[in-house]
Image (tube, grey):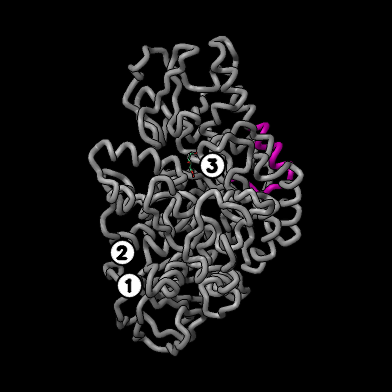
Amino acid sequence: MKQTKWWKNAVVYQIYPRSFQDSNGDGIGDIPGVISRLDYLADLGIDVIWLSPVYESPQDDNGYDISDYYAIYHEFGTMEDMEALIREAEKRGIRIVMDLVANHSSDEHPWFVEARKSKDSKYREYYIWREGEKNQPPNELTSVFSGSAWEWDEGSGAYYLHLYSRKQPDLNWENADMRRDMYQMINWWLDKGIGGFRLDVIDTIGKVPDQMITTNGPKLHEYIQELSRETFQNYDIMTVGETWGANVDNAKLYSNPDGSEFSMIFQFEHICASWSEYGKWKQEKKDFVKLKKIFSRWQKELWGKGWNSLFWNNHDLPRVVSSFGDDGRYRVESAKALATFLHGMQGTPYIYEGEELGMTNISMKDVSQIRDIESLNIYEELRQKGWTHEQLMAAINGAGRDNARTPMQWDDTENAGFTTGTPWIEVNPNYREINAKAELEDENSVLHYYKKLIALRKSEEWKDVFTDGEYVPFMDEDEDVFVYARVLGEKKLYVVGNFHEVERIVVLPEAIKEVLLSNYQETEKNELQVALRPYEAFIAKV
Ligand code: NOJ
């Protein structure tokens, strides 16, 4: 079947349902809440919603621990609500991409409940068990959420593997029955008319725990190709794999244009560039030369050989305006400049809820304010290693996942219009200034800029340049400025901007003819030499 690849020109918007819009006053966002905001999203101009998990779950990791793949988590709504969301979105030309967690399930999933009961159960082999003795885990593998990745199961006297929380046992992809059950469930959802899947930590399904191999295991691509063949390839959908261990070489397999694996992947090289031996909890100053080189390498390497996803943010990452921009004086300018830099490239752009408003990180003072299991665990772990409370809160405020999970800021009424009840996590106090209602009324807001950026990307005149145009970078070694061209035949665009507060004169390789989009109001640029004000950015034709 010939793939139409509609997703190459699509813009995706990620919704973290727990934090987007509450409709019934319980303080937790839900599916009817999402439906009530579809007009806002249609107006923004997006084509796809990636919905973080809405399946039945004990919510140990906010839904990334699924106990029933065929049911909707009751606090988010019902299956009827989900079907209504798919229908209502479709009416507005928006497809729903679901989040699929196939590396692990919840320990409350009936498979695991059965697996635990008896070593003879057929479900025992759906998970990864090792014999051993209590307090002597099979090896040193650690969980991403701190501590050993092996949990002793008292009842059956053995260890099971969990790369995430102990309530997220890893599924055994060696087991053909498990894989078959998984494919059946995926097809069941695809038959409901969804637009595709985002596949959670999919690069770990080929793990070889005894050799300490987690990502990029020897059978990884074999599994993914089978998965794709048995499911995705029979539908006109988009798929995106979450792959922290990806590099430009295996990305060409993952996003092979022949459609044998996924449409595209999320790779994290630009995100991890400043991490230290403590990972994201201790970071070096951002190096923009390094950052540009990473983007350039991915742009060039996947040219004609794969497909990039373009993102700064998701529900696991701090807010981009706080981590790469300036969330103070130049919040509006820097949010727009970062959007320009990213959306000008080749690939499918992703906007995470609130990014289009320039929402910022939150500053928490006390552990009681933290909701994220990862931050709570790292607090304990590093506290024991001697970090002070202040150091830990600074690290968590800088890099913790709750930054992305504070409620969407809709207006300046109590709780930012997110809920009439008590929100499950506190609202960022800056909602009185930063909110969708205010930005809709302000022509110069970050929100309006995103709308224009999306419209330009989709315009008849420039659409093919954004989708297919070659990426040509300039001024690689410049720490402040980004300049690249997108070229398709006779058509050429320049994407130019300033990552910092400094003022800079830049000599372009060619004189520009017309500025198509700019984050400063007065822009008269039709020459070779341009003066860039703090965080100024523009897209121009030559
Ligand atoms: C990646 C998800 O994005 C994250 O939120 C989750 O905690 C882990 N995978 C485990 O499912």
Number of the label disc, if any, that sits on residue 288: 2
Q: Which residue appears at 30% of the width and 81% of the height?
A: 503
Residue 409 placement (x, y as % from top left): 55, 63
Residue that badge 1 annotates: 500
Q: Position of residue 33 (x, y in %)?
A: 67, 55
Furthest residue toward left: 386
Between disc 1 and disc 2, whose residue precedes?
Answer: 2
Label 3 belongs to which residue? 62
Asked whether residue 374 appears in the rendered view, the answer is yes
Question: For disc 3, does the CB lie below 8 Å from ligand 1?
Answer: yes
Cβ atoms under marks 1 and 2 closer than 8 Å:
yes
Query: Amino acid type of disc 1?
Result: His
Q: Judging from the image, what secondary structure is the residue with disc 1 in?
A: loop
Q: Within 10 angstroms of label 3, few (less than 14), some, or many (20 or more) residues?
A: some
Gap between marks 3 and 2 measured at Cα: 33 Å
Instruction: Tell me if residue 194 is in the magenta stretch.
Output: yes
Task: Identify residue type, mark 2.
Answer: Phe
Badge 1 vs badge 3, beta-carbon distance below 8 Å: no
Please give the name of the residue rendered at 47% of the width and 67% of the height, measured from the top-left corner: 339
Q: Residues within 10 Å of mark 2 (few under 14, many from 20)?
A: many
Q: On screen, 483 above or below 511? A: above
